[in-house]
Image (cartoon, helix red, strand yellow):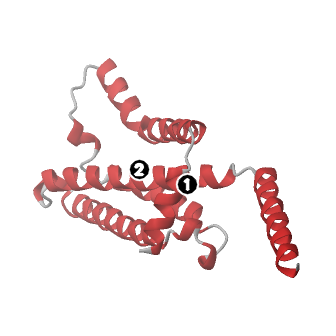
Amino acid sequence: MTGTVNILGTLRKAKMHHWLETIYWLIFTVFGSGLPIYGGWFLLALWSIKVGFVDFCKDGEFALYSAAIIGSTLHLISKGGYKNLLVNMRCFVIMSFVLLVLATLMFAAATAASIKEGDTSGILNLKLLVVSSVIVLVLAVAVAFVANLIDSIISSTDLPDIEKKRMKKLSEDFEKTGDENE
């Protein structure tokens, strides 16, 4: 439960510029990673080829996007080593590994079915694959968003302000020791 308190406590310190920086990251990440889908849809529309949403995720593509986002998030969370996990975010590491394993299994199943049958629709429940891969992608983006927000808060910590507060506390404590000796 300590990790939750630290995470929530840190999130409460978020200022508008932290949110804006993280939203900026989110826009670039979602737009950049989804560009093969948007671009593919646009090109196919130019060629008058009708495709549906399922055509862009039936082979586990969203699972790949999830794994890519979670992989970079794991690095962000664990920078500094296991003992210095970003704001005691061990719960985020566990959630990230679970999402990474799920994404890996979904992509492996879609790939295996595609290799075996040439098309995933005969072996896999496409509806389940699409829904679960979208859910994993949304969760991956949410975990990455919170991790990036916390990293933004921590990395923009005003060190001179912290030093001033520390010096003020030391001065107050020193004055208290002088009062006790009298």
Q: Quadrant of the N terminus?
A: bottom left
Residue labelled with disc 2: 141
Q: Is residue 58 left or right of residue 156?
A: left
- In front: 174, or 123? 174
Determine if residue 119 is in view. no
Q: Is residue 2 left or right of residue 121?
A: right
Q: Quadrant of the C terminus?
A: bottom right
Callout 1: SS? helix
Q: Is residue 52 above or below residue 165?
A: above
- In front: 54, or 121? 54
Q: Position of residue 121 (x, y in %)?
A: 14, 52
Determine if residue 151 is in view. yes
Q: Judge the density around disc 1: few (<14), some (14-19), many (≥20) Cα neighbours within 10 Å.
A: many
Residue 101 found in image quarter: bottom left
Q: Which residue is the extreme one toward the front? A: 182
Residue 131 is marked as none
Sequence order check, earlier mark of 1 and 2: 2
Residue at 21%, 26% in the rendered image: 50
Residue labelled with disc 1: 150
